[in-house]
Image: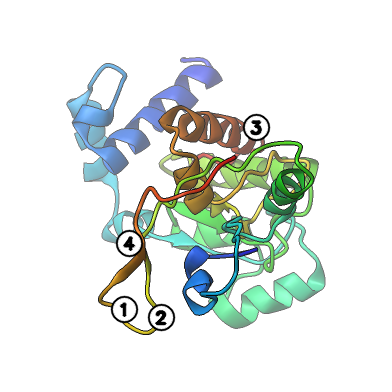
Amino acid sequence: MAIRNPYDVAQLPSVPAYLATYSWTDVELRAAARVIAGKVGPRGRLPVAVRRADDPTRVLYSIGFGLSY
Amino acid sequence: MPSRRTVITAAAGVTAALALGPHAYAGTPDDKKLRTLVSRMTLEEKVGQLFVMRVHGASATAPDQADIDANLKEIGVRTAAELIARYRVGGIIYFGWANNTKDPHQIAALSNGIQQASLGGPRGLPALITTDQEHGIVCRVGAPATLFPGAMAIGAGGSREDARTLGRISGAGLRAIGINQD
């Protein structure tokens, strides 16, 4: 779970799922807890591009990328 | 003799016109009144209007001694009211570390004290009272103000309507305690 900017996922290529909360205040952490507990589904889309850690000229996840279920 | 309300509204209109230009001024344009006001201001007053300053203290006139000491050391005045009286600053910006934002009643009283000092000056100008209420990790005014996720999370939500709702709710909360610029 990213509790500030979503870029750290570039350093974690093996994680099967990654939840971006964008910040660490009560508001975001409560929202993250609701997603983890299944109360609400994740539906955000990346508002920024996440670049590759080994090659920052290449984009790992584009703006608008996001998984839902 | 115009009522007090009329005077305050007119003064607020002048500030809006100065800060935003004629197109952003929703009231009846009155260039003559504005030009007369500006022509009467000294250079020091005009320069002072360009500054939005920070100042320690929970009150505009009677802050804690530690805040008075910090103000004397940093800006040579004791209080927010003295800052306005001496330098004719256009506004004041609130910070938590400056003890400006403890609770809603205190903040409202501080804002009223600042406006009283500013409107009571020779030109009767209102002050810009501002803070960084960005939501997410930068919120100078805490609960019971309504707190939201930061801008990147709002961007991830992808809803302009949500962004507008956030701004409307946050702005109304700030306005209720006398903060007129975010």
Query: In this figure, which residue is indicated by the disc labeled 4?
Result: B44
Identify the amino acid type marked 4.
Answer: Glu
**Callout 1 crowding tier (Cα within 10 Å): few <14, some 14–19, many ≥20:** few
* In the depicted structure, whether residue B63 falls above or below residue B117: below
Q: Nearer the viewer, residue B92 or A28?
A: A28
Discs 1 and 2 lie in a common subunit: yes
Q: Chain of mark 3?
A: B
- Residue position for label 3: B176
Please, what is the three-letter code of the amino acid marked with disc 2?
Ala
Q: How is the image coloured?
A: rainbow
Residue drawn at (55%, 64%), measured in percent from left and top? B54
| Viewer-side label of 2, 3 | 2
- Label 2 to label 3: alpha-carbon separation: 46 Å
Secondary structure of the residue carrying tag 2 is loop
Q: In the rendered view, does B22 fall on the left or right side of B51?
A: left
**Element at badge 4?**
helix
Label drawn at residue B166: none
x and y, in percent, of residue A2 in the image:
61, 65
Foreground of the two, B52 or A27 = A27
Q: Chain of mark 2?
A: A
Query: In the image, residue B165 lies at what x, y percent?
Result: 53, 28
Q: CA distance from mark 2 to mark 4?
A: 53 Å
Return the residue nearer the eye: B43 or B101.
B101
Look at mark 1 in the image and give the residue it sits on: A56
Residue at image point 50% right, 40% down: B157
Residue at mark 2 shares a chain with residue at mark 3: no
The vertical placement of B73 against B155, above or below, is below
The reply to whether the C-beta atoms of the residues labelled 1 and 2 are less than 8 Å apart is yes
Could you classify mark 2 by the number of other residues whose Cα lies within 10 Å: few (under 14), some (14-19), or many (20 or more)? some
The kind of residue tagged 3 is: Ala
The answer to which quarter of the image holds residue B139 is: bottom right
